[in-house]
Every structure is written in structure tokens, then in C-alpha cells.
């Protein structure tokens, strides 16, 4: 990073990463949603930062790691509210892509819509909507980041990172996007990512 730059993205990213990693194993839904919101806001700031584009191996590479932490938190939410497809365990796309169990446990709490307290099914539906909306936001950050890395690979300017660095960064982003897509398929949310590129061909 340019020493004369006023960019604080790396410091902000490290701070959020530290906070996410320091989250207690048992965490409330509100805390999870707040952390995910902060990750999304930080991601938007990084993607718009011109200084970060000059040194993508710094702030940019933290985004997939933060997204992975968000995914782990989302998994805990879905486990707590029983949000999953009944036949997900037999899906070839899921079986082919092993994911570790979430390191967090989400505490179920009373869910209200205005002044009305929701029952178990209504709560699960509302939480699924919130999870889906936030998953799409983080996935949007990852897909934009993927486009930036591909654009940088074609750049011939003096600040262009090395090809090996760009390949490693793009590979990390692609792996994260795929993990999000698999998880979203498990909870029946359309990610817009094709998990069956061969079988879906006409």
C-alpha cells in the first residue's frame, strides 16, 4: 500500500476479522446480522477504493476470509431454525463439496413482526428471508471482486500485481462463491450460480 495513501481499508478489515473471530461460540441472531451487515459495508468500501486496487493482495484478500466467516454464522442460524432442504443430504452437488460444521451455535429467540409474536414456522420463514437477503449481499461482493481480479489480470499498468498473486486471489474468491452457492442450494435460495454446468447444458 502507498505510504502516502489515506486508505484505512486494511485496518478496518483486520478489526472486523478480529471481532468475528472473537465472537462467542453461542451467539444471538441479532449479533450475527449486525456482523454480516458490517462485513457487507466494509466490502463495498474496499471495492470502491482506488488504493486497494493498486494493492489487491492486501485488503481484497481479506474479503473472501470475511465472507467465509459470515457463511459459518449463517450455517449456525439455519441449524438453529431448522432451515434446510429435507433431501439436501442426498444432493450430488452437496455430497461433492464437503463443508465443515459451523463453529458457532445460534441462540433461538422470540421473533416479532411489529407487535405480533411469530410462531415457530413463521419465525423460520422470516429468518430464512433475512438469511437469504444477506447471503445475496455477501455473494454480490464476491462476484464483483471476481470481476475486479479478472480485470486486473488484463491490466498492463505499473501497479499491476503479479500473475501468480492474481490467480491465487481469484481462486480463493471462486472457492468462496461455490461454497455460498452450495449452501444456498441447501436452503433453497437461488444464488444465480450454476452448480451443474455439464448436466444443465442443452
Image (cartoon, rainbow, N blue to C red):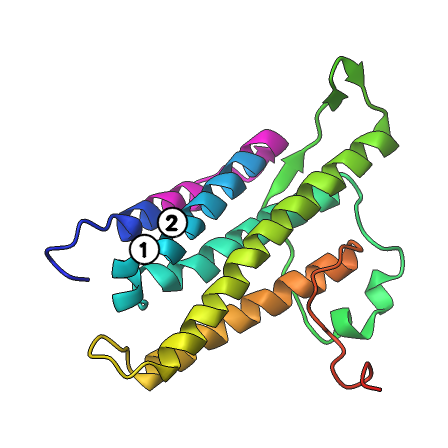
Residue 136, horizontal then vertical, whole percent: 63, 52
- Callout 2 touching callout 1 (CB < 8 Å): yes
Residue 81 seen anywhere in this rendered image of the structure: yes
Judging depth in this view, the residue of 38 and 124 nearest the camera is 38
Res 91 → quadrant: bottom right
State the residue at coordinates (45%, 44%).
Answer: 41
Secondary structure at badge 2 equals helix
Judging depth in this view, the residue of 155 and 33 nearest the camera is 155
Q: Is residue 24 magenta?
A: yes
How many dots with numbers? 2
Label 2 Cα neighbours within 10 Å, binned few <14 / some 14-19 / many ≥20: some
Provide the residue designation for mark 1. 49
State the residue at coordinates (22%, 75%).
Answer: 159
Is residue 38 rendered to the left or right of residue 15? Answer: right
From this viewpoint, which residue is outermost toward the left? 4
Residue 118, horizontal then vertical, whole percent: 82, 23
Q: Which residues are magenta?
A: 15-31
Screen quadrant of the C terminus: bottom right
Judging depth in this view, the residue of 199 and 23 nearest the camera is 199
- Residue 122, above or below 113: below
Judging depth in this view, the residue of 11 and 157 nearest the camera is 157
Provide the residue designation for mark 2. 45
State the residue at coordinates (70%, 25%).
Answer: 109
Residue 119, horizontal then vertical, whole percent: 86, 25
- Residue 19, above or below 92: above
Amino acid at each position: 500500500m502507498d505510504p502516502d495513501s489515506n486508505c484505512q481499508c486494511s485496518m478496518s478489515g483486520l478489526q472486523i476479522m478480529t471481532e468475528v473471530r472473537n465472537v462467542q461460540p453461542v451467539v444471538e441472531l441479532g449479533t450475527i446480522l449486525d456482523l454480516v451487515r458490517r462485513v457487507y459495508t466494509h466490502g463495498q468500501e474496499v471495492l470502491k477504493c482506488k488504493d486497494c486496487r493498486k494493492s489487491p493482495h492486501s485488503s481484497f484478500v481479506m474479503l473472501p476470509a470475511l465472507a467465509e466467516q459470515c457463511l459459518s454464522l449463517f450455517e449456525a442460524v439455519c441449524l438453529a431454525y431448522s432451515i434446510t432442504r429435507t433431501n439436501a443430504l442426498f444432493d450430488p452437488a452437496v455430497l461433492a463439496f464437503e463443508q465443515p460444521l459451523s463453529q458457532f451455535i445460534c441462540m433461538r429467540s422470540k421473533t416479532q413482526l411489529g407487535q405480533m409474536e411469530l410462531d415457530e414456522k413463521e419465525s423460520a420463514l422470516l429468518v430464512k428471508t433475512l438469511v437469504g437477503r444477506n447471503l445475496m449481499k455477501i455473494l454480490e461482493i464476491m462476484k464483483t471482486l471476481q470481476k475486479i481480479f479478472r480485470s486486473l489480470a488484463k491490466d498492463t499498468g505499473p501497479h499491476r500485481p503479479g500473475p501468480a498473486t492474481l490467480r491465487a486471489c481469484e481462486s480463493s474468491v471462486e472457492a468462496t462463491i461455490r461454497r455460498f452457492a452450495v449452501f444456498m442450494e441447501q436452503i433453497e435460495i437461488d444464488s444465480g450460480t450454476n452448480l451443474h454446468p455439464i448436466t444443465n447444458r442443452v
